[in-house]
């Protein structure tokens, strides 16, 4: 467009040149592997932190993330049972 | 600058630039402070049916000229207010103005209690119950079912599994059926790199940030381009309203219920079951050829989430003799929001629905 400011024209030109390779990179097998690795490492790290902090928190009589998770699972299960009963109501 | 610019034109240009600079500063401050966010989903409506987190809304309309109501089925992973952004940019408001009786099925925000929701939960229970509620509320015997994105997939499956449902017409917007053509967004799970259970968090659902990042990866540089658009148009109040509304929607995803996600990954993505005709729900094979009602398949040519090739086969898969397709030069959200939607998409959709419906 003729009315576009100069900075925008320059930006579009750079974007046009850069976006293709960046997209190709993000859709490559290598990037996919890195994402997978990142997901797995993050999970492992989270588990490790939880395992190490559990004893300490329990010593202070504080709930751990696992305790909270178990509790919310129980609440969710209870909620599901209530729903089932609701659905069965004539 | 053109060398032939007259002094009066030059003066006008300087004046315009000064005004824009002032507006840019004002809007920039408002944007940074977050004080000018448009209120979204404001079209007046009533809840006519509710089950667990799902709600069926009926939008108020005193001027209904098309008797057959339209039931819009929204996706499972995004917020339904994209269909009713703000006055002047609302697909729902447009359809109401065209004389339609509009209902919207919103699935709500799933939590741990919804982690076990399977596709059958939506297809066999949610949609049929919502259709019945819409018929009762509108006093009609049939509805037009209009599915958007994954809501289109659910609508398609519901219509196929329940040919007895009072669906007069089926309209699908940006609805993927050939998941091999959605390479980028499905690649990680399709190729077996990631197991669906590795994405599902302890709540049993896929967290919204995973979904958001998945969409972001489709066009990694898009966010930077959007900031350039913002800077260029910061002076423009109308642009700012749309930018903020769409920006909020694009960052506002909801968790994907784990059980439905596992089925989607296993059947629709890995086995491409809709194309292969191998999808089994509730112990029965789903036969899309059982859909004999008029079908309109609306596709966006510049859709980077559901590419044209992923949505195209719908008309060949259904058993309808009256199956049409509508290709529009728009993006995924551009089908329902923005200037192009109001000028091109929505008039076409409203026209098709009105032509295939009973008049009031």
Image: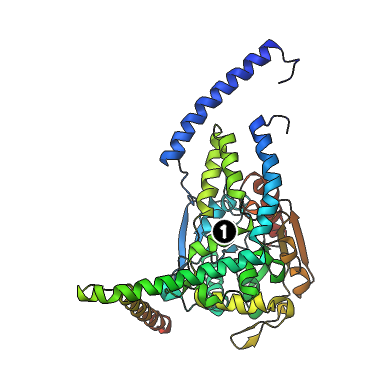
Residue B51, horizontal then vertical, whole percent: 45, 72
Location of residue A24 in the rendering, given as x and y in whole percent from the top left corner: 69, 58
Residue at (33% x, 77% y) in the render? A75
Above or below — where is B298 with respect to B124?
above
Tell me if residue B52 comes above or below residue B25 in the rendering.
below
Quarter of the image with the C terminus of chain B in it: bottom right
Question: From where the camera sits, is residue B103 visible?
Answer: no
- Image quadrant holding the N terminus of chain B, namely top right
Tell me which residue sits at (67%, 69%) in the image: B168
In the rendered image, the residue lying farthest to the top is B7
Which residue does the numbered mark 1 point to in the structure image?
A: B102
Judged from this view, the residue extending furthest toward the bottom is B283
Q: Residue B196, image x and y in percent?
A: 55, 76
Viewer-side residue, B344 vs B116 = B116
Return the x and y of residue A18 as percentages of the image width and height.
Answer: 68, 48
User: Dot 1, how many residues are within 10 Å of its Cα: few (below 14), some (14-19), or many (20+)?
Assistant: many
B328 relative to B57 in the view: left or right: right
Secondary structure beneath dot 1 equals strand
Q: Is residue B159 positioned above or below A17 on the image?
A: below
Residue B102 vs residue B311, the one in the foreground: B311
The residue nearer to you, when weighing B197 against B49, is B197
Closest to the observer, B141 or B12? B12
Q: Is residue B279 above or below residue B30?
A: below
Chain under numbered label 1: B
Is B276 situated left or right of B237 in this image?
right
């Amino acid at each position: 467009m003729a009315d576009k400011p100069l900075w925008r024209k320059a930006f579009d030109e750079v974007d046009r040149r850069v976006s293709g390779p960046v997209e190709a990179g993000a859709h490559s097998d290598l990037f996919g592997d890195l994402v997978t690795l990142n997901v797995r490492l993050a999970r492992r790290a989270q588990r490790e932190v939880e395992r190490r902090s559990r004893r300490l928190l329990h010593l202070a009589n504080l709930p751990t993330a696992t305790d909270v998770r178990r509790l919310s699972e129980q609440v969710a299960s209870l909620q599901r049972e209530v729903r089932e009963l609701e659905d069965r109501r004539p | 600058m053109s060398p032939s610019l007259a002094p009066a034109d030059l003066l006008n240009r300087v004046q315009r630039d000064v005004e824009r600079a002032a507006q840019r500063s004002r809007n920039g401050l408002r944007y940074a402070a977050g004080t000018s966010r448009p209120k979204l989903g404001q079209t007046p409506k009533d809840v006519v049916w509710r089950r667990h987190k799902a709600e069926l809304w009926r939008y108020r309309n005193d001027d209904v000229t098309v008797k057959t109501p339209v039931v819009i089925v929204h996706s499972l992973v995004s917020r339904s207010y994209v269909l009713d952004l703000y006055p002047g940019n609302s697909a729902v408001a447009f359809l109401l103005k065209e004389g339609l009786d509009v209902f919207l099925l919103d699935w709500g925000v799933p939590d741990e209690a919804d982690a076990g929701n399977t596709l059958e939960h939506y297809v066999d229970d949610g949609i049929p119950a919502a259709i019945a509620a819409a018929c009762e509320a509108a006093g009609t015997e049939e509805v037009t079912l209009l599915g958007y994105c994954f809501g289109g997939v659910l609508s398609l499956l519901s219509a196929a599994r329940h040919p007895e449902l009072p669906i007069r017409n089926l309209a699908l917007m940006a609805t993927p059926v050939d998941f091999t053509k959605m390479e980028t967004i499905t690649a990680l799970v399709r190729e077996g790199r990631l197991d669906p259970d590795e994405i599902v968090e302890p709540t049993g659902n896929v967290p919204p940030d995973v979904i958001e990042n998945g969409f972001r990866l489709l066009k990694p540089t898009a966010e930077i381009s959007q900031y350039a658009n913002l800077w260029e148009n910061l002076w423009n109040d109308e642009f700012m309203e749309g930018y903020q509304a769409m920006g909020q929607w694009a960052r506002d995803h909801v968790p994907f219920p784990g059980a439905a996600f596992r089925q989607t990954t296993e059947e629709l993505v890995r086995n491409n079951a809709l194309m292969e005709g191998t999808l089994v729900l509730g112990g029965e094979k789903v036969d899309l050829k059982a859909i004999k009602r008029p079908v309109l398949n609306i596709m966006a040519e510049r859709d980077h989430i559901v590419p044209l090739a992923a949505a195209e086969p719908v008309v060949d898969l259904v058993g309808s003799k009256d199956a049409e397709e509508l290709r529009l030069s728009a993006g995924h959200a551009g089908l329902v929001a923005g200037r192009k939607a109001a000028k091109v998409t929505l008039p076409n959709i409203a026209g098709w629905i009105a032509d295939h419906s009973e008049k009031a």
